[in-house]
Amino acid sequence: MTSDTGTQTNQAGLPSTNPTSSYWLRDPNPLLLGHRTTPDLPEEADIVIIGSGITGAFAARFLLQDYASNKKLVMLEAREACGGATGRNGGHCQPLVYGHNPAVATFELETFSFLEKLVKDENIDCDWITLQGGVHAFLSTPLFTTAVSQISSLTKTHPVLAAQLEIIPPTNPSKLAHLKVPHCHGAIIQKTAASLWPYKLTSHVLSSLLTTTPTTKQQNFNLQTNTPVLSISRPPSPSCSSPNPKKWQITTPRGTITTPQILLATNGYTSHLLPSFSDLIVPVRGQISAIIPPSLSPTNTLKYSYLFAADPEKGQHAPRDDYLVQRPVLTSIAGGEMIFGGGRRLALKLGLGQYRDDELEPTVAQYLRSNLSPPLNIGGGEAGELPAKYEWTGIMGYSRDSNAWVGEVPSHKGIWVCAGYTGHGMPAAALSARAVAAQMLELPEAGEGHAKLPEEFKITEERINRARQGPRLEDCGGWEGAYFSGLADGE
């Protein structure tokens, strides 16, 4: 497929064959490791999903268990199952209630509730912990003032959403100290937040699809890992040499597969197969560390997830947006790792246009080991640096207008996209996948009383043109329009 825009500046390539070792991928699901449901790649399918992260997994679940169990569905994954962004993120699920459109906030809150209930109902072993909230600790006064102003407006227009928030001004030092951020310039508490092991949630969904009875459902889901997609094109028509307008041919190193419908659940890698989106969904590399805290105590673990936000600092071209959640403490000497990510203002090109996750940036790694305490009041090691058990990178998909892209691609009938979460996929992907699955089958997107896919997420020619009239991510450091809508990279 060729680009409609003529620009290839931020086009992604294939996922790296030797990625950095993620904390979340250290305990792979044995059923999924190297899994190929059939030894050979099927020649045809009703639907092909490319990508096996949270979006692809839930799209397959909704298609086969809720909408169309008779469809033959093939899922292609370039690496091991869930080896991309979902297996490399920050371990948060926190809807962003302020800072972007209320319809999006409502949708994210429903996605959170859906996941929370699913984990409980199906007893999913993914370490889901519903926290007391998410603390957004502001390290500069102007940004805190902006956040307070946004919440003030939300109180007038959407009081139900505003009730999810608590403002802690700098004049309340005791509360800031209680939150372990005594030196910040103010904080916002979002009352809905959770921590989890994202890979285990997604692997549960995929494993269930592979083992579900009756047998027809199992046969209709075919997972092919370690099968990168090289290209997508129209195959020749059977009766003539011209392309078949109703089919797509997917080329892989293991052969080709033909299908009328493709779902690109590829997030930061979307432009590899859809170059016309290279200016709409830009790959952005993030870096995370699993930091060993100075002391472990089950009674002294963090009860909140954290975001540390600041305006651009002197000599830097981007603000601070570091994020943190603590793993459960297992014993006095095990567990309790601080999953700490960010430091992108120190990264090569701020991470923009970077699609390789097979390398670490030493400057960012050193920053993550050295800048957790402070701002968090937990103490520190020698010279303020704490040791890291794991350090890894992952590729996010940043959207040019800060909203996800969900729907059929204009001028490419039969190709669907569900991607571009701007580092905020965990509280949006599952129900975005539900919506796109329904769209593919021309069914209603959600039942009565459920939040529908926000209009801001839907793909239209008008939205594409409008987005392209706005600034490019690289022209504003990748932060303009994305800062409050993606407040915690890697969620």
Image: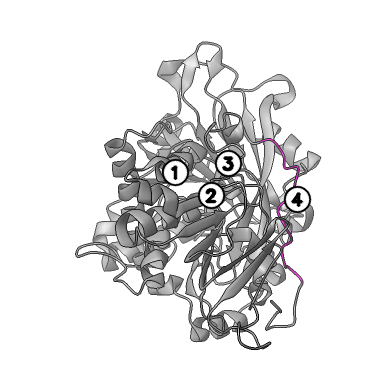
Given the image, on which type of amino acid does mark 3 rest? His
Which residue is label 3 attached to?
A: 35
Q: Nearer the viewer, mark 4 or mark 1?
A: 1
Which residue is label 2 attached to?
A: 223
SS state under label 3: loop
Q: First in sequence: mark 4 or mark 1?
A: 1
Magenta run includes residue 10: yes
The magenta region covers 9-21
Question: What is the CA distance from the residue labelled 4 to the residue labelled 1?
Answer: 40 Å
Q: First in sequence: mark 2 or mark 3?
A: 3
Count numbered badges in the picture.
4
SS state under label 1: helix
Given the image, on which type of amino acid does mark 1 rest? Leu
Of residues 455 and 145, which is closer to you in this image? Answer: 455
Q: Nearer the viewer, mark 2 or mark 4?
A: 2
Residue 98 drawn at (x, y percent): 40, 59
Q: First in sequence: mark 3 or mark 4?
A: 3
Q: Quadrant of residue 457?
A: bottom left
Residue 347 drawn at (x, y percent): 75, 50
Which residue is label 1 attached to?
A: 210
Asked if disc 2 and disc 3 are in contact, CB closer than 8 Å, the reply is: yes
Given the image, on which type of amino acid does mark 4 rest? Ala
Q: Residues within 10 Å of mark 4 (few under 14, many from 20)?
A: some
Q: Which mark is residue 347?
A: 4
Asked if disc 1 and disc 2 are in contact, CB closer than 8 Å, the reply is: yes
Of residues 60 and 219, which is closer to you in this image? Answer: 219
Question: What is the CA distance from the residue labelled 2 to the residue labelled 3?
Answer: 7 Å
* Residue displayed at 55% across by 81% down: 464
